[in-house]
Image (cartoon, rainbow, N blue to C red):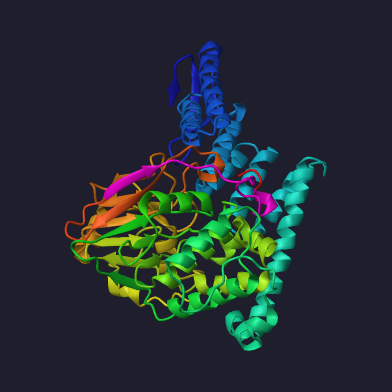
Amino acid sequence: MAVDGGGTCTTNESGKVAHCEVKDDKAIAAVLEKADAFKAEGNGYFKQHQYAEAVTKYSAAIDTIDDAPVDPRETQLHVYLCNRAFAHLRLENFGSAIIDAERALELNPQFSKSYYRRGTGYFCLGNLKAAQHFERVCQLRGGKDADALARLNECKKQLRAQAFAAAIRTRQTTPTYKQVVAEGLEKLFPVPADYAGPVYKKGQVDAEFLKSLGEWLEKPGNRLHQQYAYAMAVDFIEVLEPLPSLVNLEVPSEKEITICGDVHGQFYDLLNIFKINGMPSEENPYLFNGDIVDRGSFSVEVVLMMVACKLAYPDHMHITRGNHETSEMNAMYGFKGEMLSKYDERLYQIFCEAFRLLPLAFVVNDKAFVVHGGLSRLENVTLEDIRKIDRNKEPGSDILMTDLLWSDPSPLPGLTPSKRGVASQFGPDITEAFLKRNNLGFIIRSHEMKEEGYEVEHNGKLITVFSAPNYCDEMGNKGAFIRLKGSVMEPQFHQFTAVKHPPGPAMQYANRMLSFM
């Protein structure tokens, strides 16, 4: 194609400029200066933890170069792509981060940060073969990058741990919860005479126990005794086992139900929800829509409190499985590390067994479909298809199960690749077709941080609710919950802000590879 100034350019198959010979140096300098100004603005937003705005500015810098009659290999395009990849990582858009890093590598195979970003993206998705990318960073930097070397060694360590765990699972035929019951909880974990905390007794969990447990756990350093924590986890499994993978809930016309989104281990914000909206009870039912653990540093307290509520009111306290109620995510994002710090490996394994039994979705009054992630890339999915899922497992290669836990909505029609690198994104037409096929009114999902705590999309048919304010102690977002009255089934939104919590930053129990998060 011809270019003003006497130069020529060639394009690649996608229509992007592949190579140019340009003579108008002043015009090119102006383009490069404009792109660099966008990058500088993006850096400013990044430093303020405004990652979505940073992505917008980095994208403007990238588009400026892509639209210019210049050879991108002779620009800073690979830097802009790496910066955007970093912002995507902070937004948990791991798939988008990997794509940006790979394009940066095509432009400059010697740019070590591209390998670093790509490796981190794969690691965040649990793909530990990412070790090879950190190895390349070490090679390019002459083995002097201590951080990359540490991440490489951590990948190798995790791969060995995975292999060991797989070998143990192959030999283990009896679930951990059955093993400890057979061994005897009182024998394993005798309660000392000076223990001053709540005492759990099966079948005797009531409002008074919930109050005492909340007050006890609220004080930093307090632990529910091991015997009682184990007993509650075992009884939690007993309550969950008979449930189907899709649960139908009926809210009487004069009653309401509260639906909360991700809590992510933010125990003090959970207590604040109960303070604002009342404790769970037969008169005040709750549905927590997945991702109750990980990231926040009080996941153990959150799960014990929610389990106690479920044991007290099994028909009025409900929990959906989220993508963070999986062993792969728990090992990466903090729940496992926190459980090992506050209790032990066997209790962690019992909670993993319990998480596999959490329902994958709920239908409220035959109108609201409640699921953690969203809709599937599979065609013509029905409620009966979801009900038939064998959920007592890790998602693995089960496409429908993975999509319910991981997918996200998109304003674009049809299905598009996932920004997370898992499942897919679904458009308004997919939502409309699913609702029509299953005779439903609207969808409530969670899974994504929203600045206002909630967002309504897809022509009012899809709602995202997120209940972890100031997510990870840095995002500054509000939290929200939804109340639905049985007679009208119209969502009423309630917003709230974060409350103070004891010392202990978010992610302190997460894999050290994720310290940048």
Q: Residue 473's quadrant in the figure? A: top right
Q: Residue at x 45, y 49 (%)?
A: 272
Q: Is residue 205 left or right of residue 330?
A: left
**Between 93 and 109, the one nearer to me in the picture:** 93
Residue that protrudes farthest toward the top in the picture: 26
**Prevailing secondary structure class for the magenta stretch in the rendered image:** loop
Q: Which range is magenta?
A: 492-514
Determine the residue located farthest toward the bottom in the rendered image. 182
Residue 503 highlighted magenta (yes or no): yes
Residue 166: percent from the left, percent from the top?
A: 65, 75
Where 232 falls versus 269 (above or below)? below
- For image coordinates 29% across by 75% down, the residue present is 384
Is 454 displayed left or right of 179 in the figure? left
Compare residues 408 and 253 and report the one nearer the observer: 253
Location of residue 164 by image quarter: bottom right
Whether residue 192 appears in this view of the structure is yes
Q: Is residue 132 magenta?
A: no
